[in-house]
């Protein structure tokens, strides 16, 4: 039995922009991936609204810094065979980091935290899959448009930068923008069909990395 940790933000949590809530369990991409993989793997969803790669959000009501929280989560779910990291969208906020290059540095930090973690009981470090999130899109939602000002063009750079990082670090890579698009309701989040599409799109590369 293989164990997969999906480490992400609201796109992994399953935020439903249209209904201001959370997508049904069966519509979230980690659930779709679990169903596709079947009994050969257990998929753990670890998504938090607003989570960044490695930056503080001082307006947040809890710790959104993905680098600070990740080591505890790794320990909690060890042993792991694969860690899927889909973060960077919230790094596009000018108040957080505001650039794709900053997000890439943050992603590199997360990869190193996984690879060089002090794993309990001498467990081996897992494989890592870097996922570039869907691009931001135009929205009439003034709050989101202001919070992510300038982020659309920056988000379009993440695929190339993350792919290069994955090559440098020896990680797997998947561009979620190749299968999913954000909803113009808020320009950031995914409707149910698009979040399901990420789970379906990930199946082949996850199977390859797990050897199943």
Image (cartoon, grey):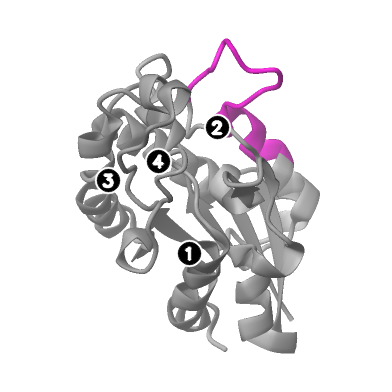
- Residue 73 sits above or below residue 55 on the image: below
Residue, disc 1: 194
In the displayed structure image, the side of residue 100 where residue 14 appears, left or right? right
* Among the 4 quarters of the image, the one containing residue 82: bottom right
CA neighbours of label 3 inside 10 A, class few (<14), some (14 to 19), many (20+): many
Q: Earlier in the sequence, mark 4 or mark 3?
A: 3
CA separation in Å, label 4 and label 1: 13 Å
CA separation in Å, label 2 and label 4: 25 Å
Q: Could you say whether the residue bearing mark 3 is in a helix, strand or loop?
A: helix
**Which residues are the magenta region?**
55-72
Q: Earlier in the sequence, mark 2 or mark 4?
A: 2
Q: Which mark is in front, 2 or 3?
A: 3
Q: Earlier in the sequence, mark 2 or mark 3?
A: 2
Q: Which mark is in front, 2 or 4?
A: 4
Marks 1 and 3 close (CB-CB < 8 Å)? no
Q: Earlier in the sequence, mark 1 or mark 3?
A: 3
In the displayed structure image, the side of residue 210 where residue 167 appears, left or right? left
Residue, disc 3: 158
Q: Which mark is in front, 4 or 3?
A: 4
Q: Which mark is in front, 1 or 2?
A: 1
């Amino acid at each position: 039995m293989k164990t997969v940790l999906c480490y992400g933000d609201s796109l992994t949590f399953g935020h439903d922009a249209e209904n201001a809530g959370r997508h049904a369990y069966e519509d979230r991409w980690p659930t779709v991936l679990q169903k596709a993989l079947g009994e050969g793997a257990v998929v753990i969803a670890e998504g938090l609204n607003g989570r960044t790669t490695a930056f503080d959000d001082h307006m947040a009501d809890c710790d959104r810094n993905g680098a600070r929280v990740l080591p505890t989560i790794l320990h909690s779910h060890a042993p792991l065979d694969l860690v899927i990291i889909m973060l960077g969208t919230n790094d596009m906020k000018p108040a957080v980091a505001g650039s794709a290059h900053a997000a890439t540095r943050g992603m590199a930090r997360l990869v190193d935290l996984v690879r060089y973690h002090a794993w309990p009981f001498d467990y081996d470090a897992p494989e890592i899959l870097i996922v570039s999130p869907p691009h931001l899109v135009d929205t009439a939602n003034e709050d989101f448009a202001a919070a992510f000002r300038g982020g659309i063009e920056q988000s379009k750079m993440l695929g190339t930068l993350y792919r290069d990082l994955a090559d440098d670090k020896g990680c797997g890579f998947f561009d979620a923008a190749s299968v999913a698009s954000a909803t113009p309701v808020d320009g950031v989040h995914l409707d149910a069909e698009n979040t399901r599409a990420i789970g379906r799109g990930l199946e082949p590369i996850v199977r390859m990395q797990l050897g199943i």
